[in-house]
Image: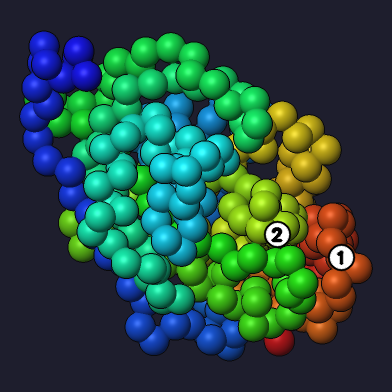
Amino acid sequence: FERLMQSPPVGAITIKRKVLEPPFTVSDWQKSALPLCRVTVHEEGGIEDTKDMLEADFANEYIGGGVLHGGNVQEEIRFLLSPECMVTMLMCPKMEETEALLIEGTERFNRHSGYGGSLDWAADYVDEQTEDGQPLTKIVAFDALVMIGRPQFDDPSKLRELNKAFIAFQKGPDEAVPLQPIATGHWGCGMFRGDKGLKMALQWLAASQAQRDMHYFIFADKCLGEAMENVISVMQNDGSEPWTVGKLAQIVFSEEAHDEDLQGRFLPFLRTKMASLSTGAWA
Protein backbone atom coordinates (compact mmCIF):
# COMPACT_ATOMS: atom_id res chain seq x y z
CA PHE A 1 0.00 0.00 0.00
CA GLU A 2 2.94 2.35 0.63
CA ARG A 3 4.06 1.81 -2.96
CA LEU A 4 0.60 2.59 -4.27
CA MET A 5 0.46 5.81 -2.26
CA GLN A 6 3.85 6.90 -3.57
CA SER A 7 3.21 5.84 -7.15
CA PRO A 8 -0.44 5.31 -8.10
CA PRO A 9 -0.91 2.53 -10.67
CA VAL A 10 -1.57 3.40 -14.29
CA GLY A 11 -3.28 1.52 -17.08
CA ALA A 12 -6.16 -0.90 -16.80
CA ILE A 13 -7.03 -4.41 -15.72
CA THR A 14 -8.95 -6.33 -18.36
CA ILE A 15 -10.99 -9.50 -17.81
CA LYS A 16 -12.11 -11.44 -20.86
CA ARG A 17 -14.28 -14.53 -21.19
CA LYS A 18 -12.95 -17.16 -23.61
CA VAL A 19 -15.51 -19.59 -25.04
CA LEU A 20 -15.58 -22.61 -27.35
CA GLU A 21 -18.96 -23.35 -28.90
CA PRO A 22 -19.58 -26.04 -29.90
CA PRO A 23 -16.81 -28.00 -28.13
CA PHE A 24 -14.63 -30.33 -30.21
CA THR A 25 -15.46 -34.04 -30.44
CA VAL A 26 -13.00 -36.92 -30.13
CA SER A 27 -13.20 -37.29 -33.91
CA ASP A 28 -12.33 -33.61 -34.38
CA TRP A 29 -9.17 -34.06 -32.34
CA GLN A 30 -8.17 -37.26 -34.07
CA LYS A 31 -8.47 -35.62 -37.50
CA SER A 32 -6.38 -32.52 -36.72
CA ALA A 33 -3.38 -32.18 -39.03
CA LEU A 34 -1.67 -29.42 -37.03
CA PRO A 35 1.89 -30.30 -35.91
CA LEU A 36 2.74 -30.90 -32.28
CA CYS A 37 4.23 -27.80 -30.70
CA ARG A 38 7.63 -27.41 -29.12
CA VAL A 39 7.72 -28.33 -25.41
CA THR A 40 10.37 -26.99 -23.01
CA VAL A 41 10.61 -28.68 -19.60
CA HIS A 42 11.69 -26.57 -16.60
CA GLU A 43 12.85 -28.27 -13.40
CA GLU A 44 13.35 -25.00 -11.55
CA GLY A 45 11.43 -21.74 -11.31
CA GLY A 46 7.74 -21.03 -11.38
CA ILE A 47 5.07 -20.07 -13.88
CA GLU A 48 4.78 -16.62 -12.32
CA ASP A 49 8.48 -15.90 -12.98
CA THR A 50 8.21 -16.14 -16.77
CA LYS A 51 8.42 -13.21 -19.16
CA ASP A 52 6.41 -12.71 -22.34
CA MET A 53 4.31 -15.82 -21.78
CA LEU A 54 0.66 -16.58 -21.11
CA GLU A 55 0.55 -17.80 -17.50
CA ALA A 56 -1.71 -20.70 -16.52
CA ASP A 57 -3.89 -20.30 -13.43
CA PHE A 58 -5.03 -23.74 -12.23
CA ALA A 59 -8.34 -22.30 -11.23
CA ASN A 60 -11.31 -23.31 -9.17
CA GLU A 61 -14.59 -23.15 -11.09
CA TYR A 62 -15.30 -20.25 -8.74
CA ILE A 63 -12.40 -17.98 -9.66
CA GLY A 64 -9.95 -17.31 -6.84
CA GLY A 65 -10.73 -20.52 -5.00
CA GLY A 66 -9.95 -20.20 -1.31
CA VAL A 67 -7.67 -17.16 -1.49
CA LEU A 68 -9.79 -15.24 1.06
CA HIS A 69 -10.15 -18.09 3.52
CA GLY A 70 -6.84 -19.87 3.91
CA GLY A 71 -6.28 -21.39 0.47
CA ASN A 72 -2.59 -21.92 -0.19
CA VAL A 73 -2.10 -23.74 -3.49
CA GLN A 74 -1.38 -22.60 -7.05
CA GLU A 75 -4.31 -20.30 -7.82
CA GLU A 76 -4.43 -18.76 -4.36
CA ILE A 77 -0.68 -18.14 -4.41
CA ARG A 78 -0.89 -16.44 -7.81
CA PHE A 79 -3.67 -14.16 -6.54
CA LEU A 80 -1.63 -13.30 -3.44
CA LEU A 81 1.35 -12.37 -5.61
CA SER A 82 -0.90 -10.09 -7.69
CA PRO A 83 -3.80 -9.07 -5.40
CA GLU A 84 -5.50 -7.13 -8.20
CA CYS A 85 -6.53 -10.54 -9.60
CA MET A 86 -9.13 -10.68 -6.83
CA VAL A 87 -11.24 -8.18 -8.78
CA THR A 88 -12.32 -11.17 -10.90
CA MET A 89 -14.03 -12.68 -7.84
CA LEU A 90 -16.46 -9.77 -7.79
CA MET A 91 -17.22 -9.85 -11.49
CA CYS A 92 -17.10 -13.46 -12.66
CA PRO A 93 -19.64 -16.19 -11.85
CA LYS A 94 -18.88 -19.90 -11.84
CA MET A 95 -16.97 -20.95 -14.94
CA GLU A 96 -18.96 -23.11 -17.33
CA GLU A 97 -17.67 -26.22 -19.08
CA THR A 98 -16.93 -24.32 -22.29
CA GLU A 99 -15.21 -21.22 -20.92
CA ALA A 100 -12.01 -19.87 -19.39
CA LEU A 101 -11.02 -16.40 -18.13
CA LEU A 102 -8.21 -14.18 -19.35
CA ILE A 103 -6.86 -11.62 -16.87
CA GLU A 104 -4.61 -8.90 -18.29
CA GLY A 105 -2.75 -6.01 -16.70
CA THR A 106 -2.42 -7.03 -13.05
CA GLU A 107 0.74 -5.96 -11.26
CA ARG A 108 2.81 -8.35 -9.17
CA PHE A 109 3.81 -7.05 -5.72
CA ASN A 110 5.15 -10.08 -3.82
CA ARG A 111 7.56 -12.99 -3.77
CA HIS A 112 6.75 -16.17 -1.86
CA SER A 113 8.39 -19.29 -0.52
CA GLY A 114 6.88 -22.69 0.13
CA TYR A 115 3.60 -24.23 -0.94
CA GLY A 116 0.54 -25.44 0.89
CA GLY A 117 1.14 -25.46 4.62
CA SER A 118 4.66 -24.07 4.19
CA LEU A 119 3.56 -21.01 2.19
CA ASP A 120 5.10 -17.75 3.42
CA TRP A 121 5.71 -14.22 2.16
CA ALA A 122 9.35 -13.89 1.07
CA ALA A 123 9.98 -10.37 -0.22
CA ASP A 124 8.73 -7.33 -2.05
CA TYR A 125 8.61 -7.65 -5.86
CA VAL A 126 8.92 -4.86 -8.40
CA ASP A 127 7.13 -5.81 -11.60
CA GLU A 128 9.33 -4.81 -14.53
CA GLN A 129 7.16 -6.44 -17.18
CA THR A 130 5.50 -3.16 -18.10
CA GLU A 131 5.06 -0.76 -21.00
CA ASP A 132 4.67 2.91 -20.08
CA GLY A 133 3.75 1.77 -16.59
CA GLN A 134 1.04 -0.65 -17.75
CA PRO A 135 1.70 -4.21 -16.50
CA LEU A 136 1.83 -6.68 -19.39
CA THR A 137 1.00 -9.80 -17.41
CA LYS A 138 -1.50 -12.19 -19.00
CA ILE A 139 -3.02 -14.94 -16.85
CA VAL A 140 -5.52 -17.49 -18.12
CA ALA A 141 -7.72 -19.23 -15.55
CA PHE A 142 -9.17 -22.64 -16.38
CA ASP A 143 -10.62 -25.22 -14.01
CA ALA A 144 -9.92 -28.96 -13.99
CA LEU A 145 -12.27 -31.73 -12.97
CA VAL A 146 -12.00 -33.14 -9.46
CA MET A 147 -10.79 -36.68 -10.15
CA ILE A 148 -11.41 -38.17 -6.72
CA GLY A 149 -13.76 -41.09 -7.35
CA ARG A 150 -14.00 -40.25 -11.07
CA PRO A 151 -12.58 -42.39 -13.92
CA GLN A 152 -10.14 -39.93 -15.50
CA PHE A 153 -8.95 -42.20 -18.30
CA ASP A 154 -12.36 -42.57 -19.95
CA ASP A 155 -13.15 -40.56 -23.07
CA PRO A 156 -15.68 -38.12 -21.52
CA SER A 157 -13.23 -37.03 -18.81
CA LYS A 158 -10.30 -36.70 -21.20
CA LEU A 159 -12.36 -34.84 -23.77
CA ARG A 160 -13.68 -32.39 -21.20
CA GLU A 161 -10.18 -31.61 -19.92
CA LEU A 162 -8.74 -31.35 -23.43
CA ASN A 163 -11.42 -28.92 -24.59
CA LYS A 164 -11.09 -26.87 -21.41
CA ALA A 165 -7.33 -26.51 -21.91
CA PHE A 166 -7.81 -25.60 -25.56
CA ILE A 167 -10.33 -22.91 -24.62
CA ALA A 168 -7.71 -21.41 -22.31
CA PHE A 169 -4.86 -21.62 -24.83
CA GLN A 170 -6.69 -20.60 -28.02
CA LYS A 171 -5.94 -17.27 -29.68
CA GLY A 172 -7.80 -14.31 -28.30
CA PRO A 173 -9.36 -11.72 -30.65
CA ASP A 174 -6.70 -9.12 -29.84
CA GLU A 175 -3.61 -11.35 -29.76
CA ALA A 176 -0.81 -10.88 -32.24
CA VAL A 177 0.72 -13.80 -34.15
CA PRO A 178 2.98 -15.60 -33.36
CA LEU A 179 1.25 -16.29 -30.07
CA GLN A 180 3.07 -16.15 -26.76
CA PRO A 181 4.01 -19.57 -25.36
CA ILE A 182 1.87 -20.98 -22.56
CA ALA A 183 3.61 -21.41 -19.20
CA THR A 184 1.91 -24.26 -17.38
CA GLY A 185 2.45 -27.35 -15.22
CA HIS A 186 0.54 -29.86 -13.09
CA TRP A 187 -2.95 -28.55 -13.83
CA GLY A 188 -5.53 -30.27 -11.60
CA CYS A 189 -2.94 -32.68 -10.17
CA GLY A 190 -2.84 -31.55 -6.55
CA MET A 191 -5.99 -31.61 -4.46
CA PHE A 192 -8.00 -32.63 -7.55
CA ARG A 193 -5.86 -35.80 -7.96
CA GLY A 194 -5.35 -35.62 -11.72
CA ASP A 195 -2.68 -37.80 -13.31
CA LYS A 196 0.37 -35.69 -14.15
CA GLY A 197 1.33 -37.62 -17.27
CA LEU A 198 -2.17 -37.55 -18.71
CA LYS A 199 -2.60 -33.84 -18.01
CA MET A 200 0.74 -33.11 -19.67
CA ALA A 201 -0.37 -34.98 -22.81
CA LEU A 202 -3.75 -33.24 -22.90
CA GLN A 203 -2.17 -29.80 -22.48
CA TRP A 204 0.35 -30.66 -25.22
CA LEU A 205 -2.51 -31.42 -27.57
CA ALA A 206 -4.34 -28.24 -26.58
CA ALA A 207 -1.30 -26.00 -26.96
CA SER A 208 -0.49 -27.55 -30.34
CA GLN A 209 -4.04 -27.03 -31.62
CA ALA A 210 -3.86 -23.43 -30.39
CA GLN A 211 -0.48 -23.09 -32.16
CA ARG A 212 1.41 -22.04 -29.04
CA ASP A 213 4.68 -23.48 -27.77
CA MET A 214 4.46 -24.89 -24.25
CA HIS A 215 6.80 -24.31 -21.30
CA TYR A 216 6.10 -26.95 -18.66
CA PHE A 217 7.19 -26.42 -15.04
CA ILE A 218 7.66 -29.67 -13.11
CA PHE A 219 8.63 -28.11 -9.75
CA ALA A 220 11.74 -30.31 -9.22
CA ASP A 221 9.91 -33.56 -10.06
CA LYS A 222 12.91 -35.06 -11.86
CA CYS A 223 11.28 -38.45 -12.53
CA LEU A 224 8.40 -36.77 -14.32
CA GLY A 225 10.79 -34.50 -16.20
CA GLU A 226 12.75 -37.50 -17.45
CA ALA A 227 9.54 -39.25 -18.57
CA MET A 228 8.46 -36.10 -20.43
CA GLU A 229 11.82 -35.72 -22.15
CA ASN A 230 11.64 -39.37 -23.24
CA VAL A 231 8.28 -38.77 -24.90
CA ILE A 232 9.46 -35.55 -26.56
CA SER A 233 12.61 -37.26 -27.86
CA VAL A 234 10.53 -39.90 -29.68
CA MET A 235 8.70 -37.15 -31.55
CA GLN A 236 11.90 -35.27 -32.37
CA ASN A 237 13.85 -38.33 -33.51
CA ASP A 238 11.08 -39.95 -35.54
CA GLY A 239 12.25 -40.02 -39.14
CA SER A 240 8.74 -40.51 -40.49
CA GLU A 241 6.12 -37.87 -41.16
CA PRO A 242 5.86 -35.13 -38.49
CA TRP A 243 3.79 -35.92 -35.42
CA THR A 244 0.44 -34.18 -35.50
CA VAL A 245 -2.30 -33.42 -33.00
CA GLY A 246 -4.41 -36.08 -34.68
CA LYS A 247 -1.78 -38.81 -34.33
CA LEU A 248 -1.25 -38.14 -30.64
CA ALA A 249 -5.00 -37.86 -30.05
CA GLN A 250 -5.49 -41.29 -31.61
CA ILE A 251 -3.22 -42.75 -28.91
CA VAL A 252 -4.72 -40.70 -26.07
CA PHE A 253 -8.25 -41.83 -26.98
CA SER A 254 -7.33 -45.41 -27.91
CA GLU A 255 -8.92 -48.36 -26.15
CA GLU A 256 -5.62 -49.16 -24.39
CA ALA A 257 -5.52 -45.63 -22.94
CA HIS A 258 -8.79 -46.19 -21.04
CA ASP A 259 -7.09 -48.36 -18.41
CA GLU A 260 -7.29 -46.75 -14.95
CA ASP A 261 -4.14 -48.74 -14.08
CA LEU A 262 -2.23 -46.21 -16.19
CA GLN A 263 -2.36 -43.86 -13.20
CA GLY A 264 1.23 -42.75 -12.61
CA ARG A 265 2.60 -44.41 -15.74
CA PHE A 266 0.81 -42.73 -18.61
CA LEU A 267 3.94 -41.13 -20.07
CA PRO A 268 5.89 -44.42 -20.33
CA PHE A 269 2.79 -45.91 -21.99
CA LEU A 270 2.66 -42.96 -24.39
CA ARG A 271 6.36 -43.23 -25.24
CA THR A 272 6.06 -46.95 -25.98
CA LYS A 273 3.06 -46.41 -28.26
CA MET A 274 4.68 -43.51 -30.10
CA ALA A 275 7.93 -45.43 -30.59
CA SER A 276 6.13 -48.49 -31.95
CA LEU A 277 4.09 -46.69 -34.58
CA SER A 278 5.56 -45.97 -37.98
CA THR A 279 4.13 -43.77 -40.73
CA GLY A 280 2.53 -46.75 -42.40
CA ALA A 281 0.61 -47.64 -39.24
CA TRP A 282 -1.70 -44.67 -39.58
CA ALA A 283 -4.90 -44.92 -41.53
Tell me, yes or no, whether the two marked residues, 2 and 1, touch with CB atoms within 8 Å. no
Q: Residues within 10 Å of mark 2 (few under 14, many from 20)?
A: many
Q: Quadrant of the C terminus?
A: bottom right
Taking 144 as reference, is 38 above or below it?
above
Query: Tell me, what colour scheme is on the image?
Result: rainbow
- Identify residue for label 1: 262
Left or right: where 234 falls relative to 58: right
Please provide percent x and percent y for residue 119.
58, 26
Residue in front for this viewpoint, 2 or 16: 2
Q: Residues within 10 Å of mark 1 (few under 14, many from 20)?
A: some
Please provide percent x and percent y for residue 139.
36, 46
Three-letter residue code for mark 2 = Gly
Q: Quadrant of the N terminus?
A: top left
On the question of residue 255 being in view, the answer is: yes
Left or right: where 270 falls relative to 105: right
Left or right: where 219 falls relative to 31: right
On the question of residue 209 being in view, the answer is: no
Residue displayed at 83% across by 38% down: 223
- Identify residue for label 2: 194
Q: Earlier in the sequence, mark 2 or mark 1?
A: 2
Please provide percent x and percent y for residue 259.
86, 75
